[in-house]
Amino acid sequence: MNDLQADEPRAITDGPFGSNLTSAHYTDSGPRVVRLQNIGDGVFHDLPAHISEEHFQALRRHEVLPGDLLVASLGETLPRACLAPAALGPAIVKADCIRVRLSPKVDSRWVMYAMQRPQVRKWADEHRHGVGRPRLGLKVIRQIPIPLPPLDQQRRIVDILEDHLSRLDAARAAVDNSGLRLSRFRQAMLQSVLNSAASAPGCSIRSIGQIALVGTGATPLKARRDFYEGGTIPWVTSADLAHGLIEHPAQLITPRALDETNVKIFPPGTLLVAMYGEGKTRGTVGELAVAATTNQACAAIQLNDPTPSNRAWVRMALEANYWQMRRLASGGVQPNLNLRLVRRIRIPFPDTETRDSILHVRAGLEDARHQLAITLERVKKRESSLRRALLEAAFSGRLNGQASDMDRVEEMAGV
């Protein structure tokens, strides 16, 4: 990468660190800040953040221009890169975002796609460091190996590659849209069965606070290594709730953390609600399959009647109330639920026969939805395999712009 940069000072640079750029500097409008969440794998995600014109001028050595290569130094997929869009306007990069201004002798698209090749991903895996959050760093990114044929050949290969990629992109968009519709179907189905229950004769309405003990956990001090190293006690965070039934929490703590902090062990069958978290996390519902502790972002609901049928009913009702719980949340930049709001959530309780009938119908619909989800996941894996093989074919000179290209790519992908 170092050999491909433009002949100008700071052609490859990262963003300002520390107090030079913090969230306190952000404004409602003004020059843009390119952050990690903007840098997709070959695509720029338009998620705006702004700073004042005055602060932009002070940090101009980190400036981004249209067509610059933007590389994420931090994340699970490395290297991850995209091009700065023409409509970006005045902008700088943030920490862990690398801006590369390339030589005019290099097609920036060529470099971006070269960084997606399986060979480069393998190289990056061997050179990255960090355990919890894998990182390459500016020094390593400068060393990323990029093949460099003549410019006209770069452009010809990229044009062919993008023609094939456009069809894969369209297929992936259709699959993603199907997944979104499937998720919406599930939520509509849950809300429908809950409304049906509420209108049943003799149905009673009770709050979570009336039917359960509601508590929460804590986060042992991260600086205390003896709270985590050699841990044997499951510790659940709101991110784990996406799995639904939580059988293998990602993190463990030690008995000392249990003794010296406010964490507490909740039994299997405890229902968990994410009170806050990034993106779609807030309002997510999970269930402990094992005894575990939690952090303070989870509301732990221990039912007075923990029988499987009652637990299944309450869990279904909470899942159906996902959007209602998100609307209940209060706060500014990141609205949160709290234990008081969770206790006030109201759930309909029809008679046992009606409840069991609804749960039976729901189980059938969930099974059908699950099978569709499995099919969509298989299609996604096929698309990913074809994309990797297509990149490998492009950079090994095996694309000629003919329909037979994809036959060759499918054979390389083994699909």
Image (cartoon, grey):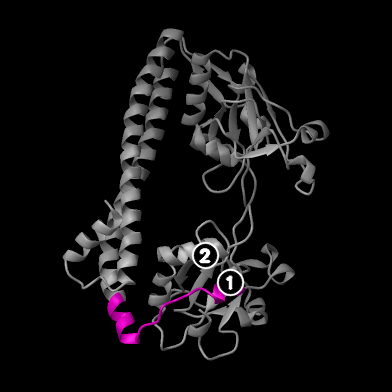
Secondary element under disc 2, as helix, strand or loop, is helix
The magenta stretch spans which residues?
139-157
Q: Position of residue 42 (x, y in %)?
A: 41, 66
Tell me the residue at 31%/29% (across/down). 368
Of the pair 224 and 263, the residue shown nearer to us: 224
Q: Position of residue 266 (x, y in %)?
A: 67, 25
- The answer to whether the residues at label 2 and label 1 have Cβ atoms under 8 Å apart is yes
Q: Is residue 150 magenta?
A: yes
The span from disc 2 to disc 1 (Cα, nearest Å) is 8 Å
Drawn side of residue 153 relative to residue 325, left or right: left
Q: At label 1, which amino acid type do we have?
A: Val
Q: At label 2, which amino acid type do we have?
A: Ala
Secondary element under disc 1, as helix, strand or loop, is helix
Drawn side of residue 106 relative to residue 157, left or right: right
Asked whether residue 46 appears in the rendered view, the answer is: no
Q: Earlier in the sequence, mark 2 or mark 1?
A: 2
Kindly identify which residue carries mark 1.
140
Kindly identify which residue carries mark 2.
124
